[in-house]
Every structure is written in structure tokens, then in C-alpha cells.
Image (cartoon, rainbow, N blue to C red):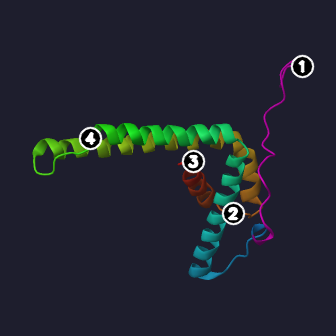
């Protein structure tokens, strides 16, 4: 239902293909085999997502610079905290809160990616290439950069 002048829908064909080891999963491997399989899926998917990040060096560089800048600012604010008083303890709690909040907000960008790649992921999960959980956790790890 696109208009004639509208650009075509975005497709993600830049994702490298999965290696032959993950092209088809074998069922019935038991608990340990399933866990090993999940770890292999997770590692391969994480590698694939990192390769996709390397295709956009400006975005990746900006993310790294942003994290380094945040680290410098936090280090400057919380450098040489006292150790024995309650003010230093509150300052440390504030630092941990800020770090958790920053990490949580950064992981929300992972959730925005899923609708964009839903068709590709559904197709690959339906073909038995990997599980949804391994894809989700690989995305979370890769977007922490």
C-alpha cells in the first residue's frame, strides 16, 4: 500500500550470512548439547552483529567517543572520594545509579532495532538457524559498545 512516490521499504541485506554450522540445528541433543548449541549461536550472532557495526565506522566511533567522554566526566566528578564518611557513601551510590541508568538507556536502542529486522529474524528463527533468546542477548551485548 505504498504510494508511487514513496521510497521502498528498508531492507537489511547487509547482515553477513550465518556459517554452515548454524544453517540447520539438530534437535534432541539433550540439555548439555542444547546449551552448547545456544552458546555457539550466541557467539556467531555476536560476531555477525559486530561485523555489521564495522560497516558503519562513523556511528561506531561516535559511540566509543561518547563512552570515553562519559567516563572522563564521571572520573572527574567522583575522583578522590572519601572512604569513611556518609557523604562519600552517598556519592558512590549516586555514581552507581548514574552508571546503571546510562547502561539501561543505552540498551533501549537494542529494542528499537527489533521492529526493523523483524522479518529477517522471523525467517531465520523459523528456518531453525538460531533461537530468539540467543539473538536478543547477542544484540544486547553488541550494542553496549
Identify the residue position indicated by label 1 in the image.
4
Which residue is at a point 55% across and 51% down the rendered structure image?
Answer: 140
The answer to whether 39 appears left or right of 27 in the picture is left
Residue at the far left: name it. 85
Give the quadrant of the N terminus: top right
Residue 46 in percent (x, y) is at 64, 58
What is the CA distance from the residue labelled 2 to the residue labelled 4? Answer: 40 Å
Q: What residue is shown with label 2?
A: 130
Q: Report the residue at 70% width, 45% height from top.
A: 118
Q: Position of residue 7 (x, y in %)?
A: 83, 25
| Mark 3 and mark 1: Cα distance apart in space | 36 Å
Q: What is the magenta range?
A: 1-21
How far apart in space, not on screen, are marks 1 and 2 (Cα)?
37 Å
> Crowding near pointer 1: few (<14 within 10 Å), some, many (20+)?
few
Residue underneath mark 3? 143
Q: Are marks 2 and 3 in contact (CB under 8 Å)?
A: no
What SS does tag 1 mark?
A: loop
Give the residue displayed 77% in from the left and 62% down from the top.
18
7 inside magenta stretch: yes
Does label 3 or label 1 sit earlier along the sequence? 1
Q: CA distance from mark 1 to mark 4?
A: 54 Å
User: Which residue bears the numbered disc 4?
Assistant: 94
Amino acid at each position: 500500500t505504498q504510494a508511487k512516490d514513496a521510497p521502498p521499504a528498508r531492507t537489511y541485506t547487509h547482515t553477513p550470512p550465518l556459517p554452515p554450522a548454524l544453517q540447520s540445528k539438530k534437535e534432541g541433543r539433550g540439555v548439555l548439547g542444547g546449551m552448547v548449541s545456544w552458546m555457539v549461536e550466541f557467539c556467531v550472532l555476536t560476531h555477525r552483529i559486530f561485523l555489521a557495526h564495522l560497516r558503519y565506522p562513523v556511528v561506531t566511533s561516535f559511540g566509543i567517543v561518547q563512552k570515553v567522554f562519559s567516563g572522563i566526566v564521571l572520573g572527574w566528578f567522583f575522583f578522590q572520594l572519601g572512604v569513611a564518611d556518609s557523604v562519600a557513601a552517598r556519592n558512590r551510590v549516586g555514581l552507581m545509579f548514574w552508571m546503571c541508568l546510562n547502561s539501561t538507556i543505552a540498551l533501549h536502542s537494542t529494542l528499537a532495532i527489533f521492529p526493523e529486522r523483524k522479518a529477517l529474524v522471523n525467517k531465520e528463527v523459523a528456518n531453525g538457524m538460531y533461537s530468539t533468546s540467543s539473538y536478543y542477548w547477542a544484540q544486547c551485548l553488541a550494542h553496549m559498545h
